[in-house]
Amino acid sequence: MHRNESEGDMALCDALLPEFDHEMANTRKTLERVPDEKLDWKPHDKSMTFVGLATHLANLPSGAIMAIEQDSFDMAPVDAAPPRQDPVASTQAALQLFDKNVAGARAAIAAASDEHLLTPWSLLAGGKTLFTMPRIAVLRSMVMNHMIHHRAQLGVYLRLNDVPVPALYGPTADEAE
């Protein structure tokens, strides 16, 4: 366990990691249900496909590494192509990518000092700052909350395809866990 040296309190990373671990486990449980035979399915023309959503969820934990190791990220750089996520080929590939990204993210969070987690990080588009927040706020909002949002979308996709929705915070209509 890390300690905030100046006050003897628990370090921010130690307070954040149990929540991170819980949300990553719940996301993995949901990703495991993506049906390989329906990767191209989507509920609406404006919606992502199963594979697009699974790919996005598998990549989201890498945002924690970016938020800790970089001072900013430009999602639409002026002088380069926007970053692209190649779609995963299967549910198993999504899980492997997710596990790799979760391990890297967890290590980055565990190694981050309180001082570093409180320094600003910015999201840019075309060189213009969209927002700046302390890195710890980025981890909560742009990594974990963002993941929870898309995991909920995936739960709807599962329901619409008669795939049992896993119990995450309590029982579902499919699991009385």
Image (cartoon, rainbow, N blue to C red):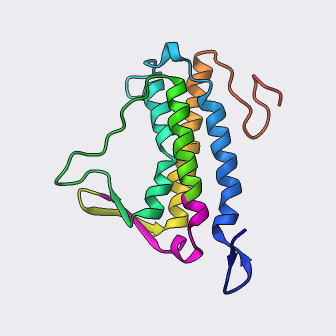
Q: Which residue is the extreme one toward the left?
A: 79
- Would you identify the image quadrant in which residue 78 lies? bottom left
Which residue is located at x 57 percent, y 40 percent?
A: 99
Where is residue 71? Give x, y as percent: 38, 67
Quarter of the view holding residue 44 = top left
Q: Looking at the picture, does residue 86 appear above or below residue 34?
A: below
Image quarter in which the C terminus is found: top right
Residue 126 at x, y = what percent? 23, 56
> Image check: 78 left or right of 35?
left
Image quarter of residue 131:
bottom left
Magenta range? 108-124
Compare residues 102 and 155 and report the one nearer the observer: 102
The residue positioned 58% from the left and 65% from the top of the image is 111
Residue with the most extreme top position? 37
Answer whether residue 111 is magenta in the image. Answer: yes
Q: Residue at x 38, y 23 (%)?
A: 45
